[in-house]
Image: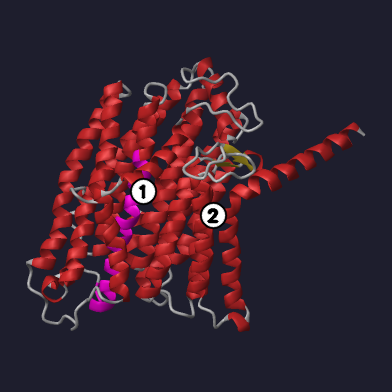
Amino acid sequence: MNQTMNLGSLITGSLNDTLAVSLPLFRTELCLAATIVLVLLCRMLPLLRRLDAGLVALGGVCFALWFAWNDMRGIPVGGLQDGSAGGAAIVRQELFGGLLVFDSLTAYIRLLLMGFLAVYIPFTKASGIPDHEDGADFYTLVLGATLGMCLMASANHLLMVFMAVEMASVPSYALAGLLKGRKASSEAALKYAVYGAGAAGIMLYGISLLAGLLGTCHLPSMAAELSRVVDAGSASGNVMVLALGGLMVAVGLAFKLSAVPFHFWCPDVFEGAAAEIGGFLSVASKAAAVALLLRICFGLGVPTTGHGAVAAIGANLAELGSTRHFIVAVVGLMAAVTCTLGNLAAYGQTNMKRLLAYSTIAHAGYLMMAVAAAVAMVGIDPAGSRDAVSAVAFYLGTYLFMNLGAFAIVALLRNRLRSEEIDSYAGLVRSSPGIVIATGVVLVSLIGLPPLAGFVAKFLVFSSLVQAITAGAERPLMLVLLVVGGFNTVISLFYYLRVLKVMTFDPPPADRPGGEFSLVSLPGAIVTALVVPVVVLGIFWSGLYACAQLAGAFAS
């Protein structure tokens, strides 16, 4: 009888937690899931086939964006927030028994991903990929991958980490092979799937090592167990197994980040896939991967009070100091190598998509530098740690416009010039000066020069490294990262400006298709909508930075 009552209480408590707490804070993902069903019905039911799958997807994304915006503003849901509607502090709340967590970082990344989709879907309609026949399949895959990315940002359990990464990755493999009948596209999808399967297998084995040794996959509970194991010393050999498991989990994260040495898939996939797919992978996937990196680094290195759990019993910052030192060393080393290799390899590229692929790798390095600084300052300079996370969030916000703008220009010029080689852009300034100016704005911002948004983003990242040096947090490594970051910024000048040199100074090829690319058109409007924020956020950046600071509260 007592067991029956306990089971009934458990079921009742789980239902109440799901219906009253978890589902109201899961509205954005539920809206995406409902939109996926509607888009699939547009493909399956004859009566709905006349509907444009892109418009249906855009409508669902707008609803999801509205929910994400309300969550970011801190509108009260179930009494979890403080009740005000203008930038209220978001209270950390675990969902679905601790599998997911809702906090300021979750809210910010959700808003970023939904805003990205709201711009990305009109861009794909303007570029012509996909066609009407494949539209439902394409948008189902895009929305499904984004749903996985939202789960990556809110994962609070290692099994959910693995599921979220796979949910984001598997649709991306299919998207890479979207161009039917093209050998390069099929090869890109195959390479992506093979590398992804290998990285997933290594990551899953690392998760099994950590779970087997610590007895849990719940990140806050793992931090508590880590403090106990590390405090016991290395006599039992457990520390070495923990380090090996952590490195294996880092393989999966590095694959999603396209970080060295797990970046090999990135240039080949970006070159073989359509430019539209490259834009999706470089922005949305990158944002989710960085959020997951922050989630795991802080989840394992910082004791956190869990929801109804013994998440931080016996854990304190001092006992987890060696864990954070290991995390900072791994992330910092990968950041330096990734940034350097990405910029050096980009210099000799002749294909624009391949150049942007190496640029994406380099920017992953810059983002990882700020992540390393944020973890290093935990317990030493909490305000500096929050500022470093805010720098990451701001960088991702500006990166959305910079990189999607670059891929949009490549896709729309491909439609006009029938080529994605840099040499085919020669002399474009004579016939299409507007698109050359737009390209110049985007590329100069990617370099990080004032007065554009990229300059503010890089300045905040480098400022977080300076804060870490001043606070004495891993000072030698932070100093090396600062020097490497500045050196790589100089290197990037050459290959970005080389593209502008070809566009402005080189003579146009004799066999170029006729017609200019006018910004007074639907494709031109898309490019303008992506380029204007790059300029505006370089001057009036306080609004986005205020949102980024709300995300930075995650590190508190």
Count of all numbered marks drawn on residues in the image: 2
The amino acid beneath tag 2 is: Phe
Q: Front-most of 462 and 545?
A: 545
**Alpha-carbon neighbours of circle 2 within 10 Å: few (<14), some, or many (≥20)?**
many
- Res. 337 image quadrant: top left
Evaluate whether residue 203 shows in this view. yes
* Residue 314 pos. (x, y %): 58, 18
Q: Is residue 408 magenta?
A: yes
SS state under label 1: helix
Between disc 2 and disc 1, the foreground one is 2
**Alpha-carbon neighbours of circle 1 within 10 Å: few (<14), some, or many (≥20)?**
many
Q: Residue at x 25, y 78 (%)?
A: 416
Vertical side of 235 occupied by 434: above or below? below
The amino acid beneath tag 1 is: Leu
Report the magenta stretch's main SS.
helix
Evaluate whether residue 336 shows in this view. no
Q: Residue at x 61, y 77 (%)?
A: 44
Vertical side of 39 occupied by 316: above or below? above
The residue indicated by pointer 2 is 67
Span highlighted in magenta in the image: 391-419
Identity of the residue furthest to the right in this view: 1
Lateral position of residue 163 relative to residue 251, left or right = right
* Residue 538 pos. (x, y %): 25, 50
The residue indicated by pointer 1 is 396
Q: Is residue 383 magenta?
A: no
Q: Front-most of 248 and 493?
A: 493
Q: Front-most of 276 and 95?
A: 95
* Residue 342 pos. (x, y %): 26, 49
